[in-house]
Amino acid sequence: MTDAQTADTASFLKLPTELLDQIASLLPRSALRALALASKKASVSAIDTLYKTYLNRTAPAKAPFHLFLRTVCERPDLTAKVKRVDIRGWRSEYEVATGAAWRGVTEVKDVDQIEKSGPCFTSTEKIVRDSATARFKLFVGAAVKAGIVSEPTSLSASALKASIVWYTSLKEDGDFLRLLGRGVEDAQLVLILALLPNMEVLRVDGLSPFPLLDCTALRKLSVLQIKGSYTNSKEPVVKSSLQFLDIMPNLRTIHLYHVAAGGHKFTINALSSTKLQGVALLECGIHARLLRKIMLGQSLVVIAYRPGPAQIDAVTGSDIALPDLLDSFAHSKLSLQTLMLFPSSTKPQKSNLKNFENLKTLEIPLFEVLSIPHDEAEPEAIHAFLKDQLPTSLNHIALRYMTSSIQTKIVIEQLAVLKMQNMLPDLDKATFNFMSAVPSSFVSTAMFNIYRPTGGLAAGMRWESLPEMEKMVREDCGKLYQDAGICMVVEQTDY
């Protein structure tokens, strides 16, 4: 039996490198470590897979960044293997200095749960016993070699600052050395990213209130996804200049959530990358000029824009009018297939959705984008507005923030009529998302006299719950949609 096992092992190790790579990509970390010890040939495939992803979604006390940082400093040959970094937010200088609670927003996950998600390297895999002085010396040497700081005359680190200075970055060598020497993850993350020359994907869940990504070199990045931190009502919103977008010639995807993009320096008119395929700016604030810079010269397939009020307030000039939004997308009018568009203005404004000739999926609020006046209740007029606005290529439309009004009912009906008249020939799905509640003064106006909530209305701005809408909508329009060949989805989650 031993001879048979030896023969099987020998046969396995004779497999082509490409097959060993595919096998390694399917194995959990524990098996990859065993494979790395099997032979020199197998070790290459195992180590390539182990270090392809750095995943650390665990709290700093349990999985600090410095463990992974030490590994890549001691083994610079491994840095080129890291293609994807997926991390939680990090502890700032203020938090470390004062002992304040970590501001991270990521759900802490058990190592076993992480392992099920696929091969990755987490900093909980290796227990390292070293002195803080030796670690600091190692990190400083790597930072000097990477060109982040000049060779220091002394390795002493000054005390941390216990006061909040919002929106500062590491502009001085002394700042970086102080944070690096005192174990602050702000500086550790800057060094980690600077040491990974082939990183293609960066996902940050919980941007520090003291963002430092402008200091990093992310030239190979193709996918960028950042979630901003959630600050309380007494604190300013996190702002980032997003200046690092200028140095990413291979960037294909930008996903930003809860980020206020302010302070950008317009040294160039357009991004260095013209390869963007998808841009999502959700609950964000962004200056109109920066938005135009991101969109200029691109042939985007997906655009999602849904601003956040707090983020808009933090960025001067970020309240972008609907016509200006659509004008900034002009270079993508033939390539765009999916559009989510939620202007910050609540006033109906003239739009030109018809220009996007190949649009397949459209998600918008009912009122602000379709140019339908709020008091319009004539079926023929609403039919004309929809016909004039909607691209004939649509196969899915999603309308949100819908209310129980006569106009809402007419819009739903006329979409089906347009399909039956072959004006929206490819439309096969319509999603209607109704609000759960509206101010009592809103539903008491004359035009909102259909699907009215039961019970009396109170004066003022008290919120009134709306009834269950799906049953009512399906009773009124279900047969019409069935005849038109449109799948109708009715939800009630917005409020």
Image: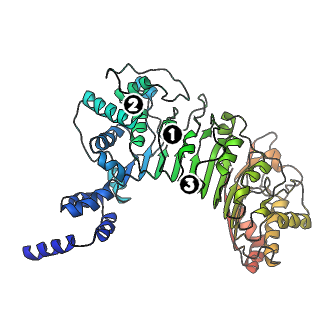
Q: Amino acid at mark 3?
A: Thr
Q: Is residue 216 left or right of residue 256?
A: left
Q: Which mark is residue 207?
A: 1
For label 3, the residue is 253
10 Å crowding of disc 2: few (<14), some (14-19), many (20+): many
Q: Which mark is residue 184?
A: 2
10 Å crowding of disc 1: few (<14), some (14-19), many (20+): many
Residue 108 in the image, given as x and y percentages of width and height = 40, 46
Q: Is residue 301 left or right of residue 463?
A: left
Q: Is residue 243 above or below residue 20?
A: above
**CA gap, disc 3 and disc 1:** 18 Å
Which circle's residue, 2 or 3, is located before the other in the chain?
2
Q: Is residue 190 above or below residue 486?
A: above
Mark 3 in CB contact with mark 1 (< 8 angstroms): no
Q: Amino acid at mark 2?
A: Val
Q: Quadrant of the N terminus?
A: bottom left
Residue 467 shows up from this direction? no
